[in-house]
Each structure stands twice: as C-alpha cells, then as structure tokens.
Amino acid sequence: MENKSRFKQFLSSRSGKIVMIIILYGILLCLLTLATEIVGDTGGLIIGIICGIFGWKALNKIRPNVFLIMPVIGWFIYFCIKGILSVMIGCFVAPFVIAKWITEKIQIGE
C-alpha cells in the first residue's frame, strides 16, 4: 500500500510531471511513426488532427478577441495559416495537457 502512495506522490510532484511529459513525447513520436508506417498517410493524418485540436485551443488562448474584417480569401488564408500552426504547436502542447489531466486525476484519486 505504501508503494502506491509513494508512486502517486511522485507523479503529482514536479519531477513526476516532467517524466510524464518526456514519456508522452516519446509515445507521440512512436505513434506518429507507427501510424504512418502501418496505416499509411491516414494514420499520420489522424494524429495530426488530434495535435491540431490541442494546438487550436492553445492558439485561441493567446490570440486577442478582436473581430477581424477581411474578404473571403483573407479568411481562407487566415484559417490555413492557423491550421498549420495549430498542428505544429499541438505536437508540443498535447503532452503537457495530457500530463496535466493525468496528474489531476491522480491527485483527485488520493
């Protein structure tokens, strides 16, 4: 019983979060590689969409809430650039968010 509580304490600590983030980066990289190898481009696309969702949410947090007036082509370019940035940022943000969720669940379970 004591070993379980020590493990929960470790995962709730700062070093535990760092270890989880590193492991999640490794898992994300392996999933991306395996998905592209096994399923083809579709697997990479699925992981890209998942990373894009995390990145889109992160970009929405840092973007000011200003209404932009642009022509239709401007909106198309805006969403294309934001989509590409979302996928790139999502690859870095996703492990942090997932590690945060895991540590919150562990702390609630105590």
Image: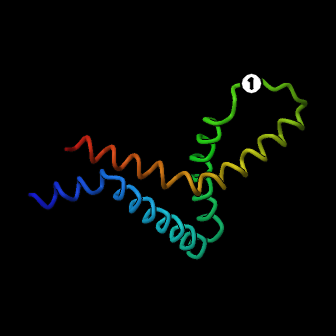
Question: Which quadrant would the N terminus be assigned to in this image?
Answer: bottom left
Q: Residue at x 14, y 61 (%)?
A: 3
Q: Residue at x 38, y 55 (%)?
A: 17
Q: Quadrant of the C terminus?
A: top left
Classify mark 1: helix, strand or loop.
loop
- Neighbour tally class for label 1: few under 14, some 14-19, many 20 plus, Cα within 10 Å: few
Q: Is residue 105 above or below residue 67?
A: below
Write down the quadrant of residue 2 in the picture: bottom left
Under mark 1, the amino acid is Val
Within the image, what quadrant is residue 33 found in? bottom right
Residue where numbered disc 1 is placed? 66
Quarter of the figure with residue 5: bottom left
How many numbered marks appear? 1
Q: In the image, is residue 20 above or below residue 100? A: below
- In percent of the image, x 54 and y 68: which residue is there? 29
Q: Position of residue 26 (x, y in %)?
A: 48, 68
